[in-house]
């Protein structure tokens, strides 16, 4: 610790702290423009200059480290004159168009001039103009170069935090200008973080432009619905109409950053595809009716299938209280454990449960990835959890964390990784087994003989490659270790084996004193909450087994009803029951399995075979189109509740608009259905009371209260049990090396069916595409941008080809989030990854002729109608 005196106030700070950081701890305001907490100091704006005793010149406080005994002054006459002069220079060429600037009312330059600026400028020359009109850099970002004050925040944020390198500077001195490559943002994520950190109105959000002023907005702090990272954000509405999203610089794990989905993808709530009234099926068509008519129809249909089994599927995007009440409704009113929360995989709870109980760390992500090395297994963090990627990059670059990657698909984080292991699709288990074998080979002498013998007895994986050896070496060389696991690994048929090998690795690291931590990287906002709330066929809330009589009795007392003791069917088994005529009622809430479940034909047949299909949703999905009864529900932002993110952090999801037309809150609809099922009115379900019940009955949530959920939420508790005591045998996974295989997942711009209803994201997103490696493309005589056909045993699709040189041989990737592709039509149940063929699409003669004419016209400087596009 070192001692520093600032404005006659003494303080002790850690060595290496800057003067600015010390002043902030004392509550002393020092103005800045170029400074940001998460970026290295630049010291270019010169607004934070201070006087330091013994030094002749003023020093930038953001870049000056405190030394023991240092004496600093921040408000002398010289400092005030210097600040005023700096602001005068900035205003010399800054356009005074504040009345039309979107930054008006929240502009840092305005604030600084009011606090520290001159009252009259000494400059009389005409202002320099870079461009007379604003430049549309991308579908969501527009720029006024004349307003730029050269703080470089946007350039540094883009390169050092986001990793996109879409912005840069040209020219020097007074002619310096920020721009994208050739006036566009060629490699841009469209995240808008450059807009967020711009202190003036140089970079602006095009969707929000000229729509409102800050003082017109009603702002609501809430949490993002698009992935499990759980970013805090603030939604601005004007007269009830959605306007914009922004982040708060000191709240949430994301602080000032958001990804493109979080910042620009919330306008899905205004989609024209909203369900406005209940609908029932009559004469093979859905007819809009009143709630009373829907109730009468549904009561009759429920009575007709009362003797048959029921099943339910709920979306992991719904709040905890809704998910808790859904499983409670299914268990007490429908008398079934046939409950699931995913249509994309079956959760192997017998393996996952002990793994989560033994090793899952409910703690801040910053703390979890602060270990000496972090191993990321499976998935693509860049596209599935973008803000998590930002934090991992920061850990690798600034905190020297050893970043290790073991996955099928490449990601942008590979560039910052210490070691990268590429595995074939579905072979994550084999890759982990090789890492385990390498660790045992290198560190066997540090293990007790009996433990070593038990590991060797089940470790029979083939010799590790250089990649697995490098990962094992880094894990051993570091101190503490963290493992982050994409839930993408749960899609594979080897999911159970992958989790077993993950348990092997974590046990081994624990025995070696590495104090391993583990978190899952969920791609749905409340997947963790869905598991915690017991939306699973074999688990009650808190992941207690439904066969556990004591746990069951506890919930039965609280709910006043009986719970079946036998584990239920997962969603795959429910579809099979539909097909065989054994399922009477299938209740689907907020999910679209006809879009996401493998084998679309099978799903369509199974859903059509259910005696009664109830769909409760905000949007007219493909699945809703098959329903017997459609109940219009509130969507995100139209009801309050809580989410539990990847960290185990529980945060408030707040209401910022009313449900459209006759749509009702999900809890109210459950009460409506329960009343019809039991032929008795139900007391209204109240979100706060349900939260209190969760806090009483679910061990990880005990002690929580609504009052404790502040701006950053609160953490649920680790409920740790002893990890698995035995080691699992290494897998042998044969994979054909000469066969192209298709894997799927999220892309950067889309995540599930909500984002495709965002007009802004659809404007910014790429067209549907197929990605594969350069070697495979060359073998098939394909080029980037070609239209290609992907064919499987089940069907085919056509899309544009993206060639990625980092892809391993044999891998084909198609994002799952484009409805038009009907990707699940290619998939077969129980087969993943999916074998496919890829070839160039046939171009009809008339299209080829038009394309040729268009190319010729472009050469001649005319369009195809003969009109010149040139001025």
Image (cartoon, helix red, strand yellow):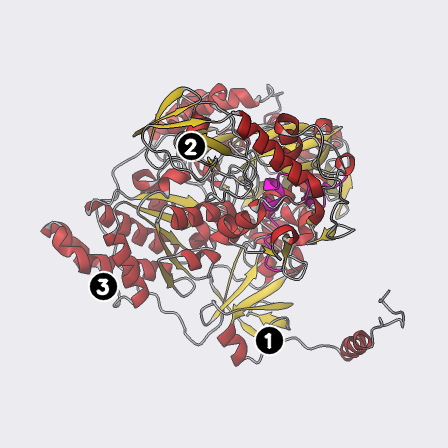
Considering the numbered disc 2 on the image, is that residue within a helix, a strand or a loop?
Answer: helix
Answer with left or right where residue 627 lies relative to residue 417: right
| Quarter-of-image position of residue 117 | top right
| Quadrant of the drawing holding the N terminus | top left
First in sequence: mark 3 vs mark 1: 3
Residue 869 vs 172, above or below: the answer is below
Q: Nearer the viewer, mark 1 or mark 2?
A: 2
Q: Residue 204 colored magenta? A: yes
* Label 2 CA crowd tier, 10 Å (few <14, some 14–19, many 20+): many
Q: Position of residue 113 (x, y in %)?
A: 65, 30
Residue 637 visible in this rendered orientation of the protein = no
Q: Is residue 545 left or right of residue 141?
A: left
> Badge 2 is on which residue?
19
Which residue is the site of mark 3? 460
Helix, strand or loop: magenta stretch: loop
**Closest to the observer: 685 or 64?**
64
Residue occupied by mark 1: 783
Residue 436: give x, y in percent of width and height. 25, 57
Q: Earlier in the sequence, mark 1 or mark 2?
A: 2
Report helix, strand or loop for mark 1. loop
Residue 544 lies left or right of residue 713; in this view the side is left
Looking at the image, is mark 2 or mark 3 nearer the viewer?
2
In this orientation, does residue 506 appear? yes
> How far is the residue under mark 3 from the one under mark 1?
41 Å
In the rendered image, the quadrant that contains the C terminus is bottom right
In percent of the image, x 62 and y 72: which residue is there? 788
Residue extending farthest left: 449
Mark 2 or mark 3: whose residue is earlier in sequence: 2
State the image coordinates of residue 799 (x, y, percent, origin top left): 64, 67
Front residue of this view, candidates 291 and 720: 720
């Amino acid at each position: 610790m070192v001692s520093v005196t600032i404005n006659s106030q003494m303080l002790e700070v850690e060595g290496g702290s800057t003067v600015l950081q010390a002043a902030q701890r004392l509550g002393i305001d020092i103005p800045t423009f170029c400074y940001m907490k998460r970026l290295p100091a630049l010291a270019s704006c010169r607004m934070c200059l201070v006087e330091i005793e013994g030094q002749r010149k003023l020093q930038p406080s953001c870049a000056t480290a405190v030394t023991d005994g240092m004496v600093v002054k921040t408000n002398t006459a010289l400092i005030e004159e210097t600040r005023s002069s700096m602001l005068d220079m900035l205003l010399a060429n800054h356009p005074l168009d504040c009345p039309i600037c979107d930054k008006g009312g929240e502009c840092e330059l305005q604030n600084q001039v009011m606090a520290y600026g001159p009252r009259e400028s000494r400059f009389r020359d005409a202002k320099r103009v870079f461009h007379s009109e604003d430049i549309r850099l991308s579908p969501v970002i527009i720029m006024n170069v004349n307003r730029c004050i050269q703080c470089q925040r946007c350039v540094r944020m883009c390169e050092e935090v986001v990793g996109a390198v879409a912005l840069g500077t040209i020219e020097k001195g007074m002619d310096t200008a920020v721009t994208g490559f050739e006036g566009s943002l060629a490699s841009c994520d469209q995240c808008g973080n450059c807009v967020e950190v711009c202190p003036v109105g140089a970079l602006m959000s095009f969707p929000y432009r000229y729509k409102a002023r800050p003082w017109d907005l009603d702002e609501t702090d809430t949490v993002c619905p698009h992935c499990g990272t759980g970013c805090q954000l603030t939604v601005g509405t004007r007269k009830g109409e959605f306007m914009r999203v922004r982040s708060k610089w000191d709240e949430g794990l994301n602080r000032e950053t958001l990804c493109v989905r979080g910042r620009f993808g919330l306008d899905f709530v205004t989609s024209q595809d909203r369900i406005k009234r209940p609908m029932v099926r009559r004469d093979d068509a859905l007819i809009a009716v009143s709630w009373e008519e829907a109730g009468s129809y549904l009561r009759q249909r429920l009575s007709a299938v009362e003797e048959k089994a029921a099943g339910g599927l709920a979306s992991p995007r719904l709040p905890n209280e809704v998910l808790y009440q859904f499983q409670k409704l299914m268990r007490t009113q429908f008398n079934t454990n046939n409950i699931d929360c995913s249509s994309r995989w079956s959760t192997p709870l017998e393996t996952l449960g002990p793994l989560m109980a033994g090793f899952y760390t409910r703690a801040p992500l910053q703390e979890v990835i602060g270990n000496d090395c972090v191993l990321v297994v499976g998935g693509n963090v860049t596209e599935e959890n973008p803000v998590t990627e930002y934090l991992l990059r920061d850990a690798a670059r600034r905190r020297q964390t050893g970043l290790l990657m073991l996955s099928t698909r490449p990601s942008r984080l590979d560039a910052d990784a210490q070691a990268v292991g590429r595995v074939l699709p579905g072979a994550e288990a084999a890759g982990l087994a090789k890492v385990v074998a390498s660790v045992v080979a290198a560190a066997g002498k540090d293990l007790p003989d009996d433990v070593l013998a038990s590991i060797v007895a089940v470790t029979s994986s083939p010799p590790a490659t250089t990649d697995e050896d490098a990962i094992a070496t880094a894990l051993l060389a570091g101190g503490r270790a963290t493992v982050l696991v994409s839930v993408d690994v749960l899609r594979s048929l080897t999911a159970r084996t992958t989790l077993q090998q993950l348990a092997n690795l974590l046990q081994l690291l624990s025995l070696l004193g590495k104090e391993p931590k583990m978190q899952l990287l969920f791609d749905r906002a409340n997947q963790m909450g869905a598991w915690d709330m017991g939306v699973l066929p074999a688990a009650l809330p808190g992941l207690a087994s439904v066969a556990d009589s004591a746990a069951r009795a506890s919930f039965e007392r609280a709910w006043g009803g009986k719970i079946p003791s036998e584990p239920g069917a997962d969603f795959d088994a429910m579809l099979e029951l539909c097909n065989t005529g054994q399922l009477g009622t299938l209740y689907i809430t907020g999910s679209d399995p006809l879009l996401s479940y493998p084998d679309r034909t099978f799903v369509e047949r199974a859903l059509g075979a259910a005696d009664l299909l109830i769909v409760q949703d905000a949007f007219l999905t493909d699945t809703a189109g098959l329903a017997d009864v459609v109940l219009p529900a509130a969507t995100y932002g139209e009801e309050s509740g809580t989410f539990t993110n990847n960290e185990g952090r529980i945060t408030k999801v707040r209401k910022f608009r009313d449900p459209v037309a006759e749509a009702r809150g999900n809890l109210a609809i459950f009460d409506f259905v329960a009343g019809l099922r039991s032929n008795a009115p139900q007391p209204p379900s109240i979100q706060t009371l349900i939260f209190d019940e969760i806090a009483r009955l679910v061990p990880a949530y005990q002690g929580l209260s609504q009052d404790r959920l502040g701006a950053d939420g609160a953490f649920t508790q680790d409920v740790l049990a002893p990890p698995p005591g035995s080691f699992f045998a290494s897998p042998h996974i044969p994979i054909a090396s000469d066969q192209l295989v298709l894997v799927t997942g999220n892309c950067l711009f889309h995540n599930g069916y909500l984002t495709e209803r965002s007009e802004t994201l659809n404007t910014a997103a790429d067209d549907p595409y197929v990605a594969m490696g350069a070697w495979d493309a060359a073998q098939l005589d394909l080029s980037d941008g070609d239209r290609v056909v992907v064919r499987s045993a089940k069907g085919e699709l056509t899309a544009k080809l993206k060639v990625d040189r980092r892809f391993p041989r044999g891998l084909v990737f198609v994002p799952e989030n484009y409805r038009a592709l009907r990707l699940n039509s290619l998939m077969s149940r129980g087969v993943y990854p999916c074998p496919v063929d890829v070839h160039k699409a046939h171009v009809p003669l008339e299209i080829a002729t038009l394309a040729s004419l268009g190319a010729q016209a472009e050469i001649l400087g005319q369009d195809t109608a003969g009109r010149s596009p040139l001025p």
